[in-house]
Amino acid sequence: MSAQRHDEREQGVALLLSLLLIVLLSVLVIEFNYETTVEAAHVSANVTQFRARVAAEAAVASGMSLLTADLLSLQQSAEAADDRESEGGAEYDSLDEAWAQGVPYEIINDAVMQCTIQDEFGKINLNALYLHDSDQLNEPLIEAVRALFDLREAPENPVDAILDWIDPDDEEGSSGAETTYYQSLAIPYACKNAPFSSVEELLLVRGITPDVFFGDPALGQLPLGDLLTVHGDPNGRINANTAAYEVLDAVGYVLGQGGLADAVVEEREDGPFVSREELDDRGILPPEDKNNPLPDMLLVRSRCFRIRGHGLYRESKVRIEAYLWRDERQPAEPLRILDWRVFQ
Protein backbone atom coordinates (compact mmCIF):
# COMPACT_ATOMS: atom_id res chain seq x y z
CA MET A 1 0.00 0.00 0.00
CA SER A 2 2.79 2.37 0.89
CA ALA A 3 4.53 1.54 -2.43
CA GLN A 4 1.35 2.45 -4.30
CA ARG A 5 1.10 5.78 -2.45
CA HIS A 6 4.74 6.44 -3.21
CA ASP A 7 4.13 5.84 -6.94
CA GLU A 8 1.08 8.11 -6.90
CA ARG A 9 3.11 10.82 -5.13
CA GLU A 10 5.85 10.55 -7.75
CA GLN A 11 3.27 10.69 -10.53
CA GLY A 12 1.74 13.81 -8.94
CA VAL A 13 5.12 15.49 -8.68
CA ALA A 14 5.90 14.59 -12.29
CA LEU A 15 2.54 15.99 -13.39
CA LEU A 16 3.14 19.19 -11.42
CA LEU A 17 6.60 19.57 -12.94
CA SER A 18 5.15 18.99 -16.40
CA LEU A 19 2.50 21.64 -15.85
CA LEU A 20 5.14 24.04 -14.53
CA LEU A 21 7.32 23.37 -17.55
CA ILE A 22 4.37 24.00 -19.88
CA VAL A 23 3.63 27.29 -18.11
CA LEU A 24 7.26 28.39 -18.37
CA LEU A 25 7.40 27.47 -22.05
CA SER A 26 4.14 29.33 -22.66
CA VAL A 27 5.53 32.43 -20.97
CA LEU A 28 8.70 32.21 -23.05
CA VAL A 29 6.73 31.76 -26.27
CA ILE A 30 4.41 34.68 -25.44
CA GLU A 31 7.34 36.90 -24.51
CA PHE A 32 9.23 35.95 -27.66
CA ASN A 33 6.14 36.56 -29.77
CA TYR A 34 5.62 39.97 -28.11
CA GLU A 35 9.23 41.01 -28.67
CA THR A 36 9.06 39.84 -32.26
CA THR A 37 5.86 41.80 -32.83
CA VAL A 38 7.31 44.94 -31.25
CA GLU A 39 10.52 44.62 -33.24
CA ALA A 40 8.58 44.11 -36.46
CA ALA A 41 6.43 47.16 -35.71
CA HIS A 42 9.56 49.17 -34.92
CA VAL A 43 11.21 48.13 -38.18
CA SER A 44 8.01 48.87 -40.10
CA ALA A 45 7.75 52.32 -38.48
CA ASN A 46 11.38 53.04 -39.36
CA VAL A 47 10.75 51.99 -42.96
CA THR A 48 7.64 54.16 -43.32
CA GLN A 49 9.39 57.10 -41.63
CA PHE A 50 12.39 56.65 -43.91
CA ARG A 51 10.23 56.61 -47.03
CA ALA A 52 8.36 59.71 -45.86
CA ARG A 53 11.65 61.51 -45.26
CA VAL A 54 12.98 60.53 -48.68
CA ALA A 55 9.80 61.94 -50.23
CA ALA A 56 10.23 65.20 -48.28
CA GLU A 57 13.86 65.48 -49.39
CA ALA A 58 12.77 64.85 -52.98
CA ALA A 59 10.22 67.65 -52.63
CA VAL A 60 12.93 70.07 -51.45
CA ALA A 61 15.15 68.99 -54.34
CA SER A 62 12.30 69.70 -56.76
CA GLY A 63 11.89 73.15 -55.25
CA MET A 64 15.60 73.80 -55.65
CA SER A 65 15.32 72.80 -59.30
CA LEU A 66 12.54 75.34 -59.80
CA LEU A 67 14.63 78.12 -58.27
CA THR A 68 17.65 77.15 -60.37
CA ALA A 69 15.58 77.00 -63.56
CA ASP A 70 14.14 80.43 -62.77
CA LEU A 71 17.62 81.84 -62.26
CA LEU A 72 18.80 80.42 -65.59
CA SER A 73 15.80 81.85 -67.44
CA LEU A 74 16.42 85.27 -65.91
CA GLN A 75 20.07 85.17 -66.92
CA GLN A 76 19.14 84.20 -70.47
CA SER A 77 16.58 87.02 -70.65
CA ALA A 78 19.15 89.51 -69.42
CA GLU A 79 21.72 88.33 -71.97
CA ALA A 80 19.16 88.69 -74.75
CA ALA A 81 18.40 92.27 -73.70
CA ASP A 82 21.81 93.91 -73.98
CA ASP A 83 20.31 97.36 -74.14
CA ARG A 84 18.67 96.99 -70.73
CA GLU A 85 20.56 97.41 -67.47
CA SER A 86 20.62 94.37 -65.26
CA GLU A 87 22.09 93.55 -61.89
CA GLY A 88 23.91 90.31 -62.45
CA GLY A 89 21.19 89.04 -64.78
CA ALA A 90 18.20 88.55 -62.47
CA GLU A 91 15.73 91.40 -63.11
CA TYR A 92 12.83 90.59 -60.77
CA ASP A 93 11.06 87.87 -58.80
CA SER A 94 7.28 87.70 -58.52
CA LEU A 95 4.39 85.45 -57.52
CA ASP A 96 3.40 84.69 -61.11
CA GLU A 97 6.56 82.68 -61.74
CA ALA A 98 6.82 78.89 -61.69
CA TRP A 99 8.80 78.72 -58.43
CA ALA A 100 5.97 80.47 -56.56
CA GLN A 101 3.56 77.69 -57.52
CA GLY A 102 5.77 75.08 -55.87
CA VAL A 103 5.31 71.37 -56.62
CA PRO A 104 1.82 69.85 -56.36
CA TYR A 105 1.20 66.49 -54.74
CA GLU A 106 3.09 63.81 -56.64
CA ILE A 107 3.70 60.09 -56.13
CA ILE A 108 7.30 58.99 -55.65
CA ASN A 109 8.14 55.38 -54.73
CA ASP A 110 4.59 54.83 -53.39
CA ALA A 111 4.99 57.90 -51.13
CA VAL A 112 3.53 61.36 -51.66
CA MET A 113 5.62 64.51 -51.95
CA GLN A 114 4.71 68.20 -52.20
CA CYS A 115 6.57 71.47 -51.73
CA THR A 116 5.86 75.17 -51.35
CA ILE A 117 8.29 78.05 -51.85
CA GLN A 118 8.14 81.42 -50.10
CA ASP A 119 10.23 84.49 -50.84
CA GLU A 120 12.04 85.63 -47.69
CA PHE A 121 12.73 89.02 -49.29
CA GLY A 122 8.98 89.58 -49.21
CA LYS A 123 9.16 89.69 -45.41
CA ILE A 124 10.64 92.07 -42.85
CA ASN A 125 14.08 90.87 -41.76
CA LEU A 126 14.31 91.08 -37.97
CA ASN A 127 18.08 90.73 -38.09
CA ALA A 128 18.25 93.87 -40.25
CA LEU A 129 16.86 96.06 -37.44
CA TYR A 130 20.51 96.90 -36.99
CA LEU A 131 22.16 98.05 -40.21
CA HIS A 132 24.24 95.37 -41.90
CA ASP A 133 27.75 95.06 -40.46
CA SER A 134 27.23 97.95 -38.03
CA ASP A 135 25.74 98.73 -34.64
CA GLN A 136 23.51 101.49 -35.97
CA LEU A 137 19.75 101.13 -35.79
CA ASN A 138 17.78 100.76 -39.02
CA GLU A 139 15.20 103.36 -38.03
CA PRO A 140 12.83 103.02 -41.04
CA LEU A 141 12.67 99.25 -40.60
CA ILE A 142 12.10 99.58 -36.86
CA GLU A 143 9.17 101.89 -37.55
CA ALA A 144 7.79 99.37 -40.05
CA VAL A 145 7.86 96.60 -37.44
CA ARG A 146 6.29 98.91 -34.88
CA ALA A 147 3.55 99.80 -37.38
CA LEU A 148 2.98 96.12 -38.15
CA PHE A 149 2.19 95.31 -34.51
CA ASP A 150 0.12 98.47 -34.11
CA LEU A 151 -1.96 97.56 -37.16
CA ARG A 152 -2.49 94.09 -35.67
CA GLU A 153 -3.58 95.80 -32.44
CA ALA A 154 -1.13 93.81 -30.33
CA PRO A 155 -1.83 94.31 -26.58
CA GLU A 156 1.80 95.35 -26.09
CA ASN A 157 4.03 96.53 -28.92
CA PRO A 158 7.12 94.31 -28.61
CA VAL A 159 9.54 96.27 -30.79
CA ASP A 160 11.69 97.53 -27.90
CA ALA A 161 11.81 94.02 -26.44
CA ILE A 162 12.84 92.66 -29.87
CA LEU A 163 15.66 95.19 -30.05
CA ASP A 164 16.81 94.25 -26.54
CA TRP A 165 16.76 90.58 -27.57
CA ILE A 166 19.23 91.11 -30.42
CA ASP A 167 21.43 93.91 -29.11
CA PRO A 168 24.71 92.88 -27.42
CA ASP A 169 24.16 94.73 -24.12
CA ASP A 170 21.95 94.31 -21.04
CA GLU A 171 20.52 97.82 -21.03
CA GLU A 172 16.73 97.76 -21.23
CA GLY A 173 14.90 99.94 -23.73
CA SER A 174 11.97 102.09 -22.64
CA SER A 175 9.53 99.18 -23.08
CA GLY A 176 12.08 96.45 -23.56
CA ALA A 177 13.29 93.46 -21.58
CA GLU A 178 16.69 92.05 -20.74
CA THR A 179 17.92 89.07 -18.73
CA THR A 180 16.61 90.50 -15.43
CA TYR A 181 13.05 90.28 -16.74
CA TYR A 182 13.39 86.83 -18.29
CA GLN A 183 15.06 85.43 -15.17
CA SER A 184 12.00 86.51 -13.14
CA LEU A 185 9.64 84.28 -15.15
CA ALA A 186 8.26 80.97 -13.84
CA ILE A 187 10.62 79.20 -16.24
CA PRO A 188 13.66 81.51 -16.29
CA TYR A 189 16.05 81.92 -19.20
CA ALA A 190 18.55 84.50 -20.39
CA CYS A 191 18.07 87.20 -22.98
CA LYS A 192 19.87 86.09 -26.15
CA ASN A 193 21.63 89.40 -26.98
CA ALA A 194 22.39 88.10 -30.46
CA PRO A 195 20.63 87.86 -33.85
CA PHE A 196 17.57 85.66 -34.19
CA SER A 197 18.15 82.08 -35.33
CA SER A 198 14.50 81.55 -36.34
CA VAL A 199 11.23 83.46 -36.42
CA GLU A 200 9.79 81.04 -33.85
CA GLU A 201 12.33 82.43 -31.39
CA LEU A 202 10.03 85.45 -31.15
CA LEU A 203 7.85 83.40 -28.80
CA LEU A 204 10.59 83.86 -26.18
CA VAL A 205 10.41 87.65 -26.44
CA ARG A 206 8.34 89.71 -24.05
CA GLY A 207 5.00 90.71 -25.56
CA ILE A 208 4.93 87.93 -28.20
CA THR A 209 2.18 85.59 -27.03
CA PRO A 210 0.91 82.68 -29.15
CA ASP A 211 -2.15 84.79 -30.05
CA VAL A 212 0.10 87.59 -31.29
CA PHE A 213 2.44 85.20 -33.11
CA PHE A 214 -0.22 83.20 -34.97
CA GLY A 215 -2.62 86.09 -35.54
CA ASP A 216 -6.40 86.04 -35.90
CA PRO A 217 -7.52 84.41 -39.17
CA ALA A 218 -10.98 85.95 -38.71
CA LEU A 219 -9.34 89.36 -39.11
CA GLY A 220 -7.28 88.22 -42.08
CA GLN A 221 -4.07 88.17 -40.06
CA LEU A 222 -1.27 85.88 -41.18
CA PRO A 223 1.12 84.16 -38.74
CA LEU A 224 4.24 86.21 -38.07
CA GLY A 225 6.26 83.50 -39.84
CA ASP A 226 4.67 84.69 -43.10
CA LEU A 227 5.45 88.36 -42.42
CA LEU A 228 8.80 88.34 -40.62
CA THR A 229 12.03 86.49 -41.33
CA VAL A 230 15.62 86.16 -40.14
CA HIS A 231 17.01 85.46 -43.63
CA GLY A 232 15.75 88.44 -45.67
CA ASP A 233 17.56 91.33 -47.30
CA PRO A 234 20.52 92.32 -45.07
CA ASN A 235 19.56 95.97 -45.54
CA GLY A 236 15.93 95.35 -44.66
CA ARG A 237 14.41 96.07 -48.08
CA ILE A 238 11.19 94.35 -49.14
CA ASN A 239 10.28 92.80 -52.50
CA ALA A 240 7.14 94.67 -53.62
CA ASN A 241 6.24 91.78 -55.93
CA THR A 242 5.95 89.17 -53.19
CA ALA A 243 5.26 90.96 -49.90
CA ALA A 244 1.99 90.28 -48.08
CA TYR A 245 -0.57 93.03 -47.64
CA GLU A 246 0.26 93.48 -43.94
CA VAL A 247 3.95 94.00 -44.72
CA LEU A 248 3.18 96.51 -47.47
CA ASP A 249 0.77 98.32 -45.16
CA ALA A 250 3.49 98.71 -42.52
CA VAL A 251 6.03 99.90 -45.12
CA GLY A 252 3.48 102.37 -46.47
CA TYR A 253 3.12 103.86 -43.01
CA VAL A 254 6.86 104.56 -42.88
CA LEU A 255 6.91 106.01 -46.40
CA GLY A 256 3.90 108.18 -45.68
CA GLN A 257 1.85 106.35 -48.31
CA GLY A 258 -1.31 105.20 -46.54
CA GLY A 259 -2.68 103.43 -49.61
CA LEU A 260 0.58 101.74 -50.59
CA ALA A 261 -0.59 98.18 -49.90
CA ASP A 262 -3.80 98.58 -51.92
CA ALA A 263 -1.93 100.25 -54.78
CA VAL A 264 0.76 97.55 -54.95
CA VAL A 265 -1.71 94.66 -54.80
CA GLU A 266 -3.85 96.26 -57.51
CA GLU A 267 -0.88 96.94 -59.76
CA ARG A 268 0.46 93.41 -59.30
CA GLU A 269 -2.74 92.09 -60.89
CA ASP A 270 -1.71 93.83 -64.14
CA GLY A 271 1.78 92.36 -63.95
CA PRO A 272 4.86 92.35 -61.73
CA PHE A 273 7.20 95.26 -61.24
CA VAL A 274 10.12 94.37 -63.48
CA SER A 275 12.43 97.11 -62.19
CA ARG A 276 12.81 99.46 -59.25
CA GLU A 277 11.99 102.37 -61.53
CA GLU A 278 8.57 100.93 -62.27
CA LEU A 279 7.53 101.62 -58.68
CA ASP A 280 7.85 105.29 -59.59
CA ASP A 281 6.51 105.02 -63.14
CA ARG A 282 3.36 103.15 -62.06
CA GLY A 283 2.56 105.63 -59.32
CA ILE A 284 3.45 103.48 -56.30
CA LEU A 285 5.91 106.00 -54.94
CA PRO A 286 5.67 109.78 -55.23
CA PRO A 287 8.14 111.77 -57.37
CA GLU A 288 11.57 111.94 -55.78
CA ASP A 289 12.12 114.91 -53.48
CA LYS A 290 15.83 115.55 -53.19
CA ASN A 291 15.28 117.71 -50.14
CA ASN A 292 13.32 114.99 -48.35
CA PRO A 293 14.26 111.61 -49.86
CA LEU A 294 12.24 108.54 -48.91
CA PRO A 295 13.94 105.60 -47.18
CA ASP A 296 15.06 102.90 -49.61
CA MET A 297 12.70 100.12 -48.48
CA LEU A 298 11.41 98.48 -51.66
CA LEU A 299 13.00 96.38 -54.39
CA VAL A 300 11.69 93.90 -56.98
CA ARG A 301 14.06 90.95 -56.79
CA SER A 302 15.04 88.36 -54.21
CA ARG A 303 17.92 86.19 -53.13
CA CYS A 304 16.58 84.09 -50.27
CA PHE A 305 13.74 81.55 -50.32
CA ARG A 306 12.15 79.09 -47.92
CA ILE A 307 11.25 75.67 -49.29
CA ARG A 308 8.85 73.47 -47.33
CA GLY A 309 9.04 69.87 -48.50
CA HIS A 310 6.34 67.48 -47.33
CA GLY A 311 6.60 63.68 -47.45
CA LEU A 312 3.80 61.22 -46.65
CA TYR A 313 4.02 57.43 -46.60
CA ARG A 314 1.21 55.47 -44.96
CA GLU A 315 0.83 56.94 -41.45
CA SER A 316 4.25 58.68 -41.41
CA LYS A 317 4.63 62.38 -42.19
CA VAL A 318 7.86 64.37 -42.52
CA ARG A 319 8.30 68.09 -43.23
CA ILE A 320 11.61 69.69 -44.14
CA GLU A 321 12.17 73.44 -44.10
CA ALA A 322 15.17 74.64 -46.09
CA TYR A 323 16.28 78.26 -46.33
CA LEU A 324 18.32 78.87 -49.46
CA TRP A 325 20.39 81.85 -50.58
CA ARG A 326 20.40 82.23 -54.36
CA ASP A 327 23.26 84.12 -55.97
CA GLU A 328 23.82 84.10 -59.73
CA ARG A 329 27.26 85.61 -59.15
CA GLN A 330 28.35 82.21 -57.80
CA PRO A 331 27.81 79.90 -60.81
CA ALA A 332 29.55 77.00 -59.08
CA GLU A 333 27.09 77.20 -56.16
CA PRO A 334 24.06 79.32 -57.11
CA LEU A 335 22.06 77.91 -54.19
CA ARG A 336 23.51 77.89 -50.68
CA ILE A 337 21.69 76.28 -47.74
CA LEU A 338 21.39 78.67 -44.80
CA ASP A 339 19.23 76.47 -42.58
CA TRP A 340 17.78 72.94 -42.77
CA ARG A 341 15.18 71.65 -40.33
CA VAL A 342 13.40 68.29 -40.20
CA PHE A 343 10.03 67.85 -38.48
CA GLN A 344 8.68 64.34 -38.04
Image (cartoon, helix red, strand yellow):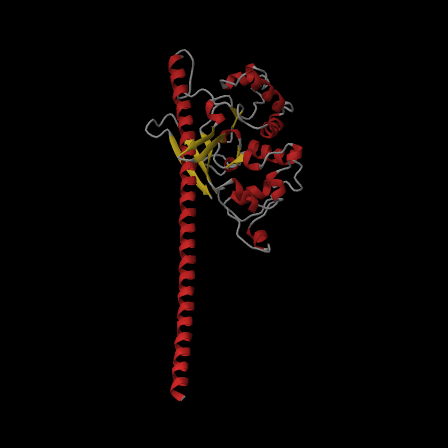
112 and 295: which is toward the camera? 112
Q: Is residue 49 above or below residue 300?
A: below
Residue at screen point 51% across, 31% down: 236
In this rendering, is residue 72 above or below 109? above
Q: Quadrant of the N terminus?
A: bottom left
Q: Is residue 306 visible?
A: no
The image position of residue 72, as x and y in percent, is 38, 21
Of the pair 341 and 124, the residue shown nearer to us: 341
- Residue 7: where, in percent of width, then height? 38, 82
Between residues 56 and 42, which one lies in front from this camera angle?
A: 42
Q: Nearer the viewer, residue 169 or 152?
A: 152
Q: Say which residue appears at 60% left-offset and 39% top-offset.
A: 214
**Picture mark count:** 0
Residue 336 drawn at (x, y percent): 39, 33
Tell me, yes or no, if residue 243 can be seen here: yes
- Give the residue drawn at x 57%, y 24%: 294
Report the residue that reaches farthest toward the left. 332
Q: Residue furthest bottom?
A: 2
Furthest residue in direction front, as rendered: 1
Is residue 146 found left or right of 196 in the rendered image? right
Q: Please, is residue 13 above or below residue 276 in the view?
A: below
Please provide percent x and percent y for residue 335.
Answer: 38, 31
> Residue placed farthest to the top in the image?
83
